[in-house]
Image (cartoon, rainbow, N blue to C red):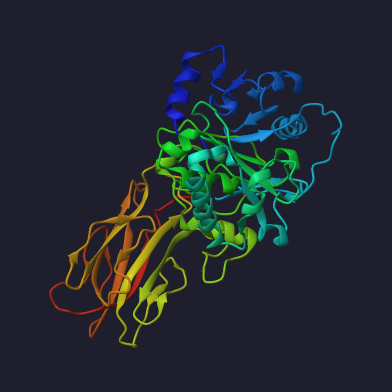
Amino acid sequence: MNIYRSALKLICQANGAKRLVLAGAVFSGALSAGCGTHDEPAASSFEEFRLNTPYSEELKRYFVEDDIAMDEVGLRSYYDRHFPTEARAPQSTSEPNLGSASSALLQYSVPSGGDVKWTSGQAMNLTYCVNPGFGGDTNNVINAMAGANLAWANAAMVNFVHLAAEDSNCQTSNNNVVFIVRPFDFGGSPAALSFFPNAPKAMRELLVDRVAITSGLLQTVLTHELGHILGFRHENNRVGPNPRAGSTCGWEDSSFRALTDQDPMSIMNCSGASNLFMTFADQSGAACEYGAAPGFTPAPCGAHGLLYHSNVQGIGWTPIERDNDITGTIGQSLRLEAFRVLISGLTAPAPSGICYTAHVQNVGWQPEVCNFQTAGTIGQGLRAEAVKFRLLNPPANCSVVYQAHVQSQGWQSPVMDNAVAGTTGQSLRLEALKIGLTPGCIFF
Ligand SMILES: [Zn+2]
C-alpha cells in the first residue's frame, strides 16, 4: 500500500539509476512495482532480477509489488512465476500452504497448485499481536486493526484476532500468534508492508510506516494489507487497460485467479488510499473464496453485469438481482425504501459505472450517488417515490433502461438515461424496479 504513489512515480521517472534511499531502509535496484516491472526487459537471470529488486538490509527481505515482502526463497518463486521461460533452478525450500492464492478481487493463485489461502480453521483465527513500539499510537493501531478486520469478517468467514497478552512479546519468533504488527520507518513509502498466506513464519509481519497513521487513512491501509494476508492481490494486476485513470499501477504477474470482475474502486487497488473502498465486489469476492459471513448476501460468484437490490419495508435488504430481474415486491403493498446498484466487470476508464438518485417522501430528490452507494433511506419509514439512473462514461450506444412499479399504477413504461421513473407529488410508493443495460453495452 503506497499512499503517495504519485510522488514515487516522479522519483521513478527522474531517476534512471533506479536507486531509492529511504530513511530507515535502503532499496537498491529497480523499483519493480513502482516503475512498472513489465515495462522493463525481462531479467536474463534470477541473479540479475534479484539484484534489481528493492531490498532492505535492515529487514533482510525483498519488496515486490510495493508492499509485499519476500525472503530470497520467496523471491525465487516469484521470479519463476514472472519469467516462466527461464531455466529454473530447483527450489531449495518448499513453501508451506502454497496451493494457489487469490487476488477483487484477485486471489493469489499458482497454475499448478490452486489458491494460496488459509484453511477454513486458520482463516477464522488469524491471531496477531501489536508491538508496543507504536508508543502513543498503539491504541490507534489496535482500533484500526479491529475495524479492518470487520471490513473482511462482515463479508467472509475470516477473523483476525488480537491477542493482547502477546503484545509484550510481539516478535515473529512468538509462535502464539500467526503474525505480528509492528512499526517500521519506510520514510513514507510504502505506507505499510505485509505478506501472502504462504509466507514462512519469520516473514509474517505487517509493518506500518508512521505516514499510515498520520494520513488519517490507517484503517483503509490496514484493510488493504489484511486483504494481502488473506491472499488477495492488487486489483490492477489484470490484463488490459488499467481501470484507474492516472494510476501508475499495472500488470504484475499471472499468478492469480479472478474472483470478481474488474473493480475500479476495489480496496485492493495498489495505491491512492483515499480512493480505495471496501466494495461490494470485494466483499463478494472474499465470500466466494472463504465462504459468506452470516448475514451477508454476496453477488453470485463470478457474476458480472448489472447487480442491484433494494431495501423493502418490513424485509430489509433483498437478495442481489441482475440484468432486468425484479427487485422489490409486487402486490404486497410494501414500500421500496432504498436501493443499491453496481456494474460488475467494468473495464471502462475511471470514473465509470452507474449513478442514481431517489425522490423520497418528505425529502424530495436526494443527492446523486454511484456504484453501490445507497440511495433512499433506511429505517426511517420513508417511501421512495421516483428514481433516475445514468451511466458514467459508458461505451458508445450503451444506455441504462429502467422501469418502476408504482402503488395503484403497476408497471410504468420503461425509461432511460436519467429520465424519471415513478412519480413525484402524488404520494405514491415505489414498490419494485427493473434495471438493465442496452445490448450495446460491451463492458466486458
Ligand atoms: Zn498492496
Left-right relation of 166 to 47:
left
Residue 356 appears in which quarter of the rendering? bottom left
Left-right relation of 47 to 300:
right
Q: Position of residue 23 (x, y in %)?
A: 54, 21
Q: Name the residue nearer the viewer: 216 or 398.
A: 216
* Residue drawn where x is 55% and y is 27% of the image: 36
* Residue drawn where x is 43% and y is 28% of the image: 6
Q: Name the residue nearer the viewer: 288 or 21.
A: 21
* Residue drawn where x is 40% and y is 76% of the image: 316
Q: Name the residue nearer the viewer: 408 or 279.
A: 279
Q: In the rendered image, is residue 395 in sight?
A: yes
Q: Position of residue 209 (x, y in %)?
A: 52, 34
The quarter of the picture showing ligand 1: top right
Left-right relation of 383 to 283:
left
User: In this picture, is 329 found above or below 262?
Assistant: below
Q: Position of residue 249 (x, y in %)?
A: 51, 33
The extreme left residue here reads: 425
Q: Name the residue nearer the viewer: 78 or 130.
A: 130
* Residue drawn where x is 79% and y is 42% of the image: 95
User: In this picture, is 329 found above or below 263?
Assistant: below
The extreme top residue here reads: 17
Q: Position of residue 409 (x, y in %)?
A: 23, 82
Residue 360 appears in which quarter of the rendering? bottom left
Left-right relation of 394 to 117:
left
Q: In the rendered image, is residue 45 in sight?
A: no
User: In this picture, is 240 found above or below 427?
Assistant: above
